[in-house]
Amino acid sequence: MKFEDLSSNVKSSYQRKKYIEIPTDVVKPDSTQPRKSFSEESLKNLAETYRTHGVIQHIEIDENYKIITGERRWRAAKIAGLKTIPCVVIGGLSEEEKLERRLIENIHHEPLTDLEKGEAIKKLIELKGWSVPRAARVLGVDEDVIRRVLSLIEAPKELRKLVKEGKISPSDAGEISYKLRDKPTEAVEVAKKVAKARNNKRKLVREEVKRIKLKERVKPIPEGIYNLIYADPPWEYDFSIDTARSIPMHYPVMKLEDICNLKIPAAEDSILFLWATPPKLREALKVIEAWGFNYKTSFVWVKDKIGMGYYCRNQHELLLVATRGNVSPPAESDRYSSVIYSTRTRHSEKPDIVYEMIEKMYPDYKYLELFARSKRRNWTGWGLEYEK
């Protein structure tokens, strides 16, 4: 039915934008609506309200009786058995103008799914030739939200599946897909990890993204030959589902295999000082062997504050000592107690006194610190945070 064939009442509604009751069977949905799914339970609840109070808020239709906005209300009215529904006829709108009205209504009322929202916003941007900032201003939505939903529709299938299954929120998935848009494999892995976490998921998203971004800054281990290696590996802990307080929150971790496979520029005759937490003692001994050293002894650092732990609350760390080739023990006058008492500072940071101890025990050696955070005179350093 065309506009010229409409009744005078409908024409009046169009011309003056007044409400008019139109038979629900005459009104038709539009296939270009951004919303593709409707909650049956929600529609039934809304229909029950309509049976008692009627449809309070009108819907918008075009001159061909096609719904511009309000399809959910129309569906609920039909379920409620209402013969008519209040409408206002708005004619002469282009497809992009209709889409814009639908988006604005849905964004600020019962929301579209983020995937539906992303598809609609993408289409609107293409039709209007908008930039993201322009779309944000017109739709009244934050720019980052638009970027996230646009990234979500381009996200890998596995990531979008996690969203549809309710295992990860659309906002978290959008942030992952946006910030790791050039790393689809890593994005899926992060999404899976977030889906398994019980809480603090948003924090985990940011830390996992940070970990991957930091990896981009990895530089080769310095060339040369060093006869003293000092290392504090970022051990990976595999027992924590809720990772908000775990190691990755503070420093990107490495798998044991990757630590073992590092090519260490150690001299044939050299010594290694390797930090290990008590739960990682076995792994630390594997690293010592993989790097070509033989375990000799250890120091223990006793902290002033108690930390995390499962079987016990840890308050100490181990500094393992290993050698390769022919390395003599330090002079007797330069041998320290095996127990180091020092305060605990920021996460994973080790006592400065250890540097002084090493330098006194082996004063003429060439020092290399692996996984270093700060520079020190007469030392060569390597690590993700070393150049910050």
Image (cartoon, helix red, strand yellow):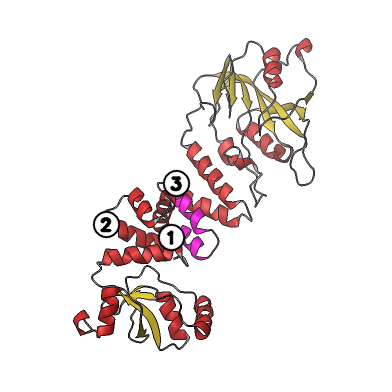
Above or below residue 135? Residue 91 is below
Q: Is residue 158 magenta?
A: yes
Q: Circle 2 sits in a helix, a strand or a loop, which is it?
A: helix
Q: How many marks?
A: 3
Q: Along the line of sight, which residue is nearer the eye, 329 or 161?
A: 161
Q: Nearer the viewer, mark 1 or mark 3?
A: 3
**Which mark sits nearer the N-terminus, 1 or 3?**
1
Residues packed near mark 2 inside 10 Å, few (<14), some (14 to 19) or many (20 plus): some
Q: Is residue 258 magenta?
A: no
What amino acid is found at the position of numbered circle 2 in the picture?
A: Lys
In the rendered view, does 78 fall on the left or right side of 326? left
Q: Which residue occupies the foreground of this view, 92 or 120? A: 92
- Verify CB contact (< 8 Å) between mark 3 and mark 2: no
- Alpha-carbon span between mark 1 and mark 3: 17 Å
Q: Amino acid at mark 1?
A: Lys
Residue at the disc numbered 2? 128
* In this rendering, position of residue 129 left or right of residue 373: left
Q: Residue at x 73, y 26 (%)?
A: 296
Mark 3 vs mark 2, foreground winner is 2
Measuring from the top left, give residue 149's x and y in whole percent.
Answer: 42, 56
| Residue of label 1 | 157
Residue 109 location (% of width, % of height) = 46, 66
